[in-house]
Image (cartoon, coloured by chain):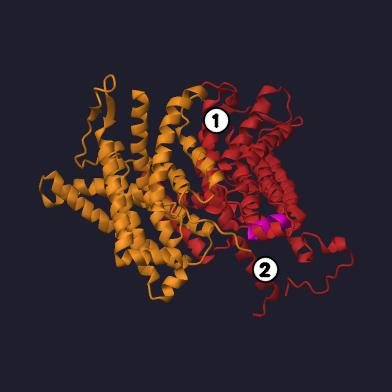
Chain colours: A orange, B red
Amino acid sequence: MGFFLETLFGGLMAGMLYSLVALGFVLIFKASGVFNFAQGAMVLFAALSMARFSEWIPQWLGFDNLILANILAFAVSVSLMVVVAWLIERLALRKLVNQDGITLLMATLGISYFMDGAGQLLFGSATYKIDVGMPKEPMIVLENLFDGGLLLSKEDLYAAAAAAVLVTLLSLFFQKTKTGRALRAVADDHQAAQSIGIALSRIWIIVWSMGGIVALVAGVIWGSKLGVQFSISLVALKAFPVVILGGLTSVPGAVLGGLIIGVGEKLSEIYIGPMIGGGIENWFAYVLALAFLLVRPQGLFGDKIIDRV
Amino acid sequence: MFYRENGQFKSTYRDDQQIFPILQDRIAIGMLLLVAMVAVPLLASDYMFRAVFIPFLILSLAAIGLNILVGYCGQISLGSGAFMAVGAYAAFNLQARFDGMPLIVSLIGGGLCAMVAGVIFGLPSLRIRGLYLAVATLAAQFFIDWFTNHVKWVTNDSPSGSVSVGDLNFFGLALNTSVEKYLLCLVIVLVVGILAKNLVRGAIGREWMAIRDMDVAAAVIGIRPVYAKLSAFAVSSFIVGVAGALWAFVHLGAWEPAAFGIDKSFQLLFMVIIGGLGSIVGSFFGAAFIVLLPLFLNQVPHWLGLPLSTATASQLEHMIFGALIVFFLIVEPHGLARLWLTGRQKLRLWPFPH
């Protein structure tokens, strides 16, 4: 029972991490209707930028304080992701307005190849470290209830907390601020939003920057867990089932989907895995999402697909 | 001036329904076939066969298969690498476990197994649509990746996980040289290409296109979506499976499961999008683009005389590839086939502007 709870908690926290990456997808799809295949590349790019700048800034400015270096590197990375968003909007999105979904998908795939190459060219292709002060030792809880207690990773807890804070901030942003309302208007209907005076191109830059900043946070967290290397861009492949399970247009869907996928993955690996040879983590998430989709084709919280003839 | 079709009247339905009704088209295709079957084998070098012509032929076969699913039936599939893998491993098993199995039977057997896999993994398309389906087909990709890695009898209990095929022979004729392999691929591509073209011109092709355009309306007028969508998956996976078997047998020779990963799926999808959705000739153009582009990008630093390290060169290649994809999609979202069609329309009027 203790082991089951441990796996459960581990799955919940891994799920929060997946939903961090999935948030970027949902944000961008909600407001610009583009399924951003380049989200993984953006996570890698942002993580590389954070890792390298936190190394370079102390060298350039000549001080030693890690916290200040991290803060400055974060600020620089945020501005870099905003510039990237501006470039993507200007050079790619603006010219591809009104194309159908698969063309936009392929365009983002092209952008992801470009960012992979550009990130490694600018920042180098070795493995880099991100050190934002996350504790690496695990902690043991509930020793009185279970033999030896449950092993929880403190780092994962901090990451889950950071994800929760980010989701709350995003929800507040969407509900309470003027720009948030404009984003929701654009997500509902581009033409109507334009007709009441919302500048679509500015909204798209804002949304892609937010996607970039979410990618940065995800990149920092994953990077401090795994080290910043090329395989981080493959985390996006794990986030796809989260997105389609939760619904492509729903922020709470991304969170709930992440939790379900995280728990499902870990439990299946432990309990079903040994029966069929192990290593089923990769595809089980997809099969789980597929099973949900067969019951609800639009995902848990997605917009209902209305067929019109 | 040269491409006029006036004076070419047809007096039978059969003549009117040909794939190439215009005489100039038939002459052009005849010359192309002559070049492909006679001139290329005589004149091209071994490197050209191995690096350009054979990959081009096999990938255009796979692109025809994927185009039938994505371009003609509108079901976005990101799992085509997995179906290539199924075709390759099934053909390998048929070849390795039965002595004296003819090559064609192994290839067709591989295609049939891929067809079964395609129908099974195409079942979600009956309920899920659009981008959700695209991501759901990734389930096929990852499942087959895991399957070929973990299930030992797929690789004939090979200890390292990688398998190889020995010398190929076509009903007794040994296929050792690149020229012979090229001719085998060429014949298969021609046969399947003609079959595919006739399929999409016929009733089933029209059903697929109706489903693509508006599946609810298609169901209203009596096209059964189950039959249309699953047949699209079946035909497409068969062709992709045969292409996968050819890729493994003829091009790779020896391979491991990673050879048919998600990158292959993306490569095939790029070919179909850049070549033109819903166009058989577009599949050829797309395959040519994707095969030639990396070779070209590799040579450019050499021509310009810039000394780049291999890492920098490969990253620049990635960047230029990505940028070219986006550029292409901006300039001509309907692909090279549309450019070709526009060119032919202009050619009909040449030298007049309108």
Question: Can you tell which quarter of the image residue A187 is in?
Answer: bottom left
Q: Nearer the viewer, residue A187 or A102?
A: A187
Marked residue chain, label 1: B
Give the residue drawn at x 45%, y 33%: A281
Expressed as whole percent of the image width and height from the top left, the position of residue B241 reads 64, 39
What segment carries the magenta color?
B206-215
Q: Nearer the viewer, residue A173 or B96?
A: A173
- Mark nearest the camera among 1 and 2 is 1
Q: Quadrant of the C terminus of chain B?
A: bottom right
Label 2 sits on a secondary structure element that is helix
Query: Disc 2 designates what residue?
Result: B344
Classify 10 Å Cα crowding around label 2: few (below 14), some (14-19), many (20 and above).
few
Give the residue drawn at x 62%, y 28%: B165
- The answer to whether residue B68 is left or right of residue A66 is right
Expressed as whole percent of the image width and height from the top left, the position of residue A161 reads 27, 43
Label 1 sits on a secondary structure element that is helix
Give the residue drawn at x 55%, y 50%: B269
Query: Disc 1 designates what residue?
Result: B147
Identify which amino acid the numbered label 2 is placed on: Arg
Marked residue chain, label 2: B
Classify 10 Å Cα crowding around label 1: few (below 14), some (14-19), many (20 and above).
some
As drawn, the label of residue B245 is: none
Question: Is residue B210 within the magenta segment?
Answer: yes
In the rendered image, residues at marks 1 and 2 fall on the same chain: yes
Question: Is residue A209 within the magenta segment?
Answer: no
Q: Nearer the viewer, residue A200 or A62?
A: A200
Q: Is residue A116 visible?
A: no
Instruction: Looking at this view, name the residue that lies furthest to the front.
Output: A145
